[in-house]
Amino acid sequence: MIFLFVACSKQDTSSQTTPNPTPNPTPTPTPAPTFVFAKGADISWVTQMESSGYKFYDSTGTQKDCFTLLKSLGMNSIRLRVWVNPSDGWCNTTDLVAKAVRAKNAGMRIMIDFHYSDVWADPGHQTIPVAWVGQNITTLETSVYNHTQTVLNTLKANSITPTWVQIGNETNDGMLWETGRASTNMANFAGLINAGYNAVKAIDTTIKVIVHISNGFDNSLFRWVFDGLKTNNANWDIIGMSLYPTTSNWALQNFQCLTNMNDMVSRYGKQVMICEVGMDVNSPTVCQSFLNDLFTKVKSVSNNNGLGIFYWEPESYNWQSYSLGAFDNTGKPTVALNAFAN
């Protein structure tokens, strides 16, 4: 080992100033993501209505694009359903993308509602798509995964990333019957949920996955479904609910829904969202009271775990005999939608 000694001569420092180093700046904390309560609508019928000549108007009678009109009423999010291979083409992937592009251009967040059917999926109907008939559970899981990825990749190719994705629609008793019926095989239902969940997260881990049940006032139904999914190791981020009260029982159902939402948050540690609401279009003032109260209740769920409310097809008027919209017979929004301005 060699030691080197360097001789240093003493310097005259009488004329030198003491260095004054700049202190390390205090790091700027990264701001927490801003919580934005979702105020939205499912308007999946809009392109079909427009193709039939329907137009939409603001309160002054001025014709408006439906997306722009809803945004002017205070909405910030749009929900859109997608079917696998509908016979008339409406709500297929091409139609979905056309509406999603319009929602994005309007500056609105997007929820995609996968029905995993060629037609309506709801508590009474969960019909396997024709192309998937005869598949066993393993193949059905692959079909769910591939369909989910194909749709989301098509959206991504159009520069659209949804904020939320529903795996199934009103799956009170599972989906893709009979194989995925929850009351006969909860494990199969959980496997299908996981197939969709994994497909979503493979596209973008920031997308929140929703499992959606009707009758948001029915706590026993929600406990049965989500206890079963949890026992069978299903994955989800948000518990979605529908709520369609009458003009006479809305106050009770809102109270029961709040009780259920708080229970879901504490029982499963998950956030909650009202994915569908509606009321008789002929009682818009009562509907506004119902919505005002529901907004207050959802926002009261602790720690911002109540994420938002979506009205189901408010733009429908004189259309397919649907009577729970929120536009009058002249194509103008009723006062019910004033609740979304708050």
Image (cartoon, rainbow, N blue to C red):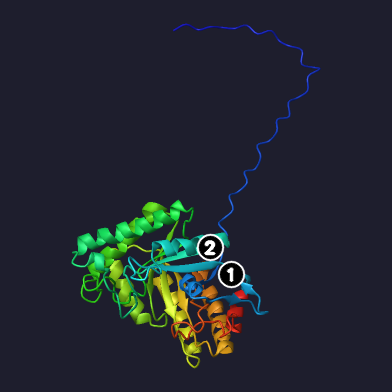
Q: Nearer the viewer, residue 264 or 3?
A: 264
Q: Residue at x 25, y 68 (%)?
A: 130
Q: CA distance from mark 2 to mark 1?
A: 10 Å
Quadrant occupied by the N terminus: top left
Tag of residue 332 = none
On the image, the x and y values in percent for residue 190 come to: 28, 66
Q: Residue at x 35, y 56 (%)?
A: 149
Q: Quadrant of residue 57?
A: bottom right
Q: Nearer the viewer, residue 227 or 144?
A: 144
Q: Residue at x 56, y 64 (%)?
A: 36
Tag of residue 102 = 2
| N-term mark: 2 or 1 | 1
On the image, the x and y values in percent for residue 40 come to: 53, 71
Q: Are marks 2 and 1 in contact (CB under 8 Å)?
A: yes
Q: Is residue 259 above or below residue 304?
A: below
Q: Residues within 10 Å of mark 2 (few under 14, many from 20)?
A: some
Quadrant occupied by the C terminus: bottom right
Q: Nearer the viewer, residue 300 or 96?
A: 96
Describe the element under mark 1 as helix, strand or loop.
Answer: loop
Location of mark 1 (residue) = 65
Describe the element under mark 2 as helix, strand or loop.
Answer: helix
